[in-house]
Image (cartoon, helix red, strand yellow):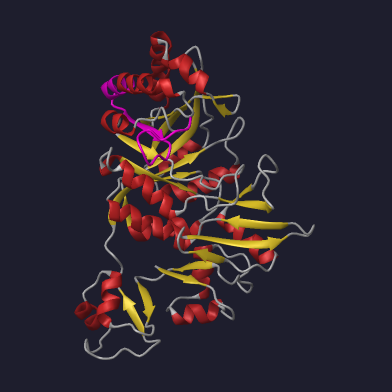
Amino acid sequence: MQIYTIRQGDTLYNIAKTFNSTVSDIVRANEIPQPENLVVGQTIVIPTYGNFYFVRPGDSLWLIGRRFGINYLTLARINNINPNMTLPVGLRLYIPPFPKVRAEVNAYIEPIGNQASPQLLNDARKAAPHLTYLTTFSYEAKRDGTLDPVPLEGITDIAAQNDNALMMAITNIENGQFSGELGRDILQSEAVQNLLLDNIIAEADRVGLFRDIHFDFEFLPADMRQPYNNFLRKATERLHSRGYLVSSALAPKTSTDQPGQWYEAHDYQAHGEIVDFVVIMTYEWGYSGGPPLPVSPINEVEKVLRYALTQIPASKIMMGQNLYGYDWKLPFVQGGEFATAVSPQRAIEIAKQNNAEILYDNTAQAPYFDYIDNTGAQHRVWFEDARSIQAKFNLLKNLGLRGISYWKLGLPFPQNWLLIDENFDVVKK
C-alpha cells in the first residue's frame, strides 16, 4: 500500500501511472468525490502490493534498506540492480510489503435515540470486516443498579455477519455526562453493585453475542480509586465464571499520581492485574472546548503508552485512536464557541471548498490547515490522514501492544481500514 501526498500539478492519471495503479482503483480506495479536484497536501493511499521509493540526494541502498528494515542486498536483488552502484536521484525502487502482525481492533458504535441511523449502520458495515470487537456505547448504570440499554437493532446482525465479538460498554453517564457522584453511589453500595452485575449478566445472556463486558467509569472522585479496583475484582470474578472477558477504559496518564478528576481514580497497575485488557483513551489533547491542537499527537500518545507499559503488560493494552478531527474558529476564546467535530473526509472537503493547502506537523505527526470562511472568520482544522494513522500503527507494532480501539464509528475514514489490512492480521473472536 503506497501513501502519497498530493503536490501542485498532480493528477490521478499521472499518480496512477507512476505507481502502477489505475485512476478507478485510487478513487475507489479513497472515496474521492471529485477526482479532478485534488487538494495540495491531501494524502491518498494507492492500492499496490508493497510500495515504491524514489531515491533522494544522499541516499544509498544501505541507508534505504535500513530505513525500511530490509537488507540492502535483498533490495538490490528485488530491483535487479548492482548493490554497489551509485543510485541516481529519482530512481524508483520497489519495497516489498512488511510482514503483518496479529492485533485486535475495536470500534465503538453509539446509536443516538431509539435506533442506529442508516448512515451509522452503513459505516459499521464497512468497518466490521476489519474489527475484532464492536462496542455498543453505552449501557448507562443507574443509582439503583439497573441499566439503561442500548438500541441494538441492526448492530447484532452486522456483528454476526462479520465474526465481531460485541463488547458491552457500561458507563457512569447520567443526563448525557459522566457523573462522578453516580459512580460514587454505585461503588459505595455492595447491594447496588450486585444488582448491577445481575443485570449486566442477564442482558449479555439475552443478546448472546457479547464476549466482553467493558467498564468505562470516568471522572470518579479520587477517593473512589480503591473502591473502583474492588468493584472490578468482583465483576471480573463473576463475569469470568460466566465465560465473559472483562475490560476497562483508562484516561491517558503519564504518571501514577497525575492530578485531575479524569485521572486520579484510574489505577493503571491494578487494572492491568484485574481485567483481561484495557483501552487507553489516547486522544483529546485537542478537544471541542479547548484550544486548537492535534487530537492525538503521537509524541504525547507515546508518552502515555510508555508509562502504561511500566504498569500493564503490552499484551493487555489497546491504544485508543480518534476517527475525527476538529474545526476551530479563531481566535480561540475559553468558554466560547465549541469546535465542530469533522471526519477526515469532511476535513478534506472543507480544505477543497476554501482552497486551503493541507500542512503536516512532523512532531505531532498530524495534518492541519487554516482557512477563512464566508463571514471572514479564520479557522484552524486538525484531523487524521493516512500518514498520521500509519505513524500510530508503527508505534503500536514497535511497542508490541494488543491492538487499537477507535472512537467512534460514523465519521468516514476509508484509508484507515485499508491500512488496517495492510499492517495487521485482525484477530476474530
Query: In the image, 347: left or right of 199?
Result: right
Q: Quadrant of the C terminus?
A: top left
Residue lying at the far top of the rendered structure: 191
| Residue nearer the viewer, 206 or 49 | 49
Residue lying at the far right of the rendered structure: 375
Q: Residue at left 40%, top 18%?
A: 202
Residue 257: x %, y % from top left = 38, 33
Q: Quadrant of the N terminus?
A: bottom left
Residue 232: x %, y % from top left = 34, 23
Q: Residue at left 64%, top 72%?
A: 37
- Residue 89 forms part of the magenta stretch: no
- Residue 260 forms part of the magenta stretch: yes
Q: Residue at left 35%, top 90%?
A: 88
Residue 322 to residue 219: above or below: below
Res 211 visible: no
| Residue nearer the viewer, 75 or 338 | 338
Query: In the image, 296: left or right of 72?
Result: right
| Residue nearer the viewer, 98 or 24 | 98
Res 28 visible: yes
Q: Residue at left 46%, top 62%?
A: 386
Residue 361: x %, y % from top left = 50, 63
In terms of image quadrants, where is residue 347? bottom right
| Residue nearer the viewer, 260 or 220 | 260
In terms of image quadrants, where is residue 115? top right
In terms of image quadrants, where is residue 368? bottom right
Residue 290 to residue 211: above or below: below
Residue 181 to residue 97: above or below: above
State the extent of the magenta-drawn residues as a range: 235-261
